Amino acid sequence: MGRDTRVVGNRVIANNHPNFADPNAIVAKVPPGTGVFIMAADGTEVAGNEIRGNDSFGIAVVGLGAAFPGTTSFDVGAVPEGTWIHDNRLVDNGRNPAPAVRALGAVNADLLWDGSGWDNAWRQPGARAFPPWLPDRTWPTFLRRAWSRTFSLLRVLAG
C-alpha cells in the first residue's frame, strides 16, 4: 500500500500499450490505456501533471475491491483515503476504454472513481468524470460520506 505520495509535474501521454505484467501479479489487472492509477493508497496528491491521450482514463482512484470483488481478504488497507487530485491538464482520455472500464460505464473519462474512500477530493474544472460529480474539498463531510456510500451502493446494485 502506498502512503503520502505526491505525483507532480509529470507528462503521462498515450500510455496505451498492452499490459505486460505477470498474469498472476495484481498489476496484471491494470487496463491498457491507463494514465495514473491510484489503488488503495492513502494520502496521494496528483497535481500539475499533463495527462492526455490515454485510451481507458486519465486518473483513476479505486479500492482493491474493484479488482478483487466478493469476499477477498486483504492484508493491507483496501480503500484509498485522503487522495487530492487538482490542477492537472487532462485532454483526450478515455476515448477507447478497455472492456473492464467500458463495463463500468466509464467512457471518455479523464477522471474515474469507484466511490471508495469518502475523503478523496478533486478540483479539476472542465474534466470529464465518472461518476459525473466528484467531491471536492468544499463539500461538507456529511455530503462527501453520503455520496461515496450512495455511489458505491449503486455500483453494487448495477453490477
Image (cartoon, helix red, strand yellow):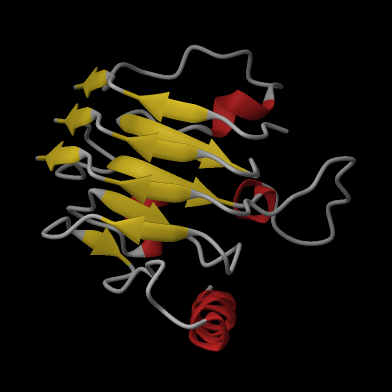
List x then y, in percent, for residue 23: 63, 20
Using the rendered image of the protein, determine whether residue 75 is visible from the camera's viewpoint: yes
With 61 as the anchor, is 102 left or right in this view?
Answer: left
Q: Nearer the viewer, residue 57 or 104?
A: 57
With 20 as the anchor, is 156 left or right in this view?
Answer: right
At 63% from the left and 54% from the top, the residue drawn is 81
List x then y, in percent, for residue 142: 57, 87
List x then y, in percent, for residue 14: 19, 22
Quarter the N terminus occupies? top right
Residue 121 image-quadrant placement: bottom left
Q: How many marks?
A: 0
With 43 as the anchor, is 124 left or right in this view?
Answer: left
Vertical comparison of 19 with 89: above or below: above
Vertical comparison of 103 with 37: above or below: below
Q: Nearer the viewer, residue 145 or 66?
A: 145
Using the rendered image of the protein, determine whether residue 98 is visible from the camera's viewpoint: no
List x then y, in percent, for residue 76: 83, 41
Residue 28 image-quadrant placement: top right
At 55% from the left and 80% from the top, the residue drawn is 141
At 18% from the left and 28% from the top, the residue drawn is 50
